[in-house]
Image (cartoon, helix red, strand yellow):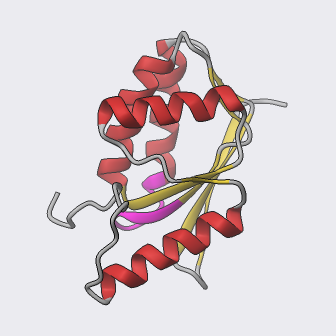
């Protein structure tokens, strides 16, 4: 299959789900292509969104890991309120966890879409109620 991605809005939960197919990031050039195409997908929505990321189909190789971490953080800060992940291969999950620690981006990884969605909705609900979420590391002020 050829490299592709889609970002679909789930109106019932007011969340966007990102899906990737054969997006294999080996070089910095691959990461910049990924960022450009992700930014195009975000342009379909007005303003920042809550995002679920299906990591199946997105593969980050060690040769692209450092650049991916930086670009991922910038894209998410600019386009999302919060993001939660699910799926993905072990290497990609390790790069995301590592880049999250290095670049201050949330990891928020769950085994299934249902679990990621439940965590996202729980965080959103707690913030609306003014509650404290001790691990809500991806919350960003709307004034960014």
Answer above or below: position of 40 versus 16: above
Magenta-drawn stretch contains 45:
yes
Q: Quadrant of the C terminus?
A: bottom left
Helix, strand or loop: magenta stretch: loop
Q: Position of residue 7 (x, y in %)?
A: 60, 56
Q: Residue, x 38% and y 48% (percent of image)?
A: 76
The image quarter in which residue 142 lies? bottom left
The residue positioned farthest toward the left in the image shown: 143
Magenta-drawn stretch contains 39:
no
Q: Is residue 9 visible?
A: no
Q: Position of residue 98 (x, y in %)?
A: 45, 29
Number of marks in the rendered image? 0
Q: Position of residue 114 (x, y in %)?
A: 70, 69
Q: Residue, x 41% and y 77% (percent of image)?
A: 124
Q: Residue, x 62% and y 30% (percent of image)?
A: 92
The image quarter in which residue 125 lies? bottom left
The residue segment tinted magenta is 42-51
């Amino acid at each position: 299959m050829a490299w592709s991605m889609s970002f679909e809005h789930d109106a019932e939960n007011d969340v966007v789900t990102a899906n990737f197919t054969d997006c294999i990031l080996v070089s910095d050039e691959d990461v910049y292509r990924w960022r450009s195409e992700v930014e195009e997908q975000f342009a379909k929505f007005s303003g920042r969104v809550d995002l679920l990321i299906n990591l199946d189909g997105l593969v980050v190789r060690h040769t692209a890991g450092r650049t991916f971490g930086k670009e991922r953080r910038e894209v998410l800060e600019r386009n999302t309120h919060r993001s939660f992940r699910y799926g993905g291969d072990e290497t990609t999950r390790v790069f995301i966890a590592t880049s999250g620690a290095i670049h201050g981006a949330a990891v928020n990884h769950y085994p299934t879409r249902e679990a990621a969605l439940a965590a996202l909705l729980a965080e959103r609900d707690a913030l609306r109620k003014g509650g404290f979420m001790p691990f809500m590391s991806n919350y960003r002020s709307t004034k960014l």
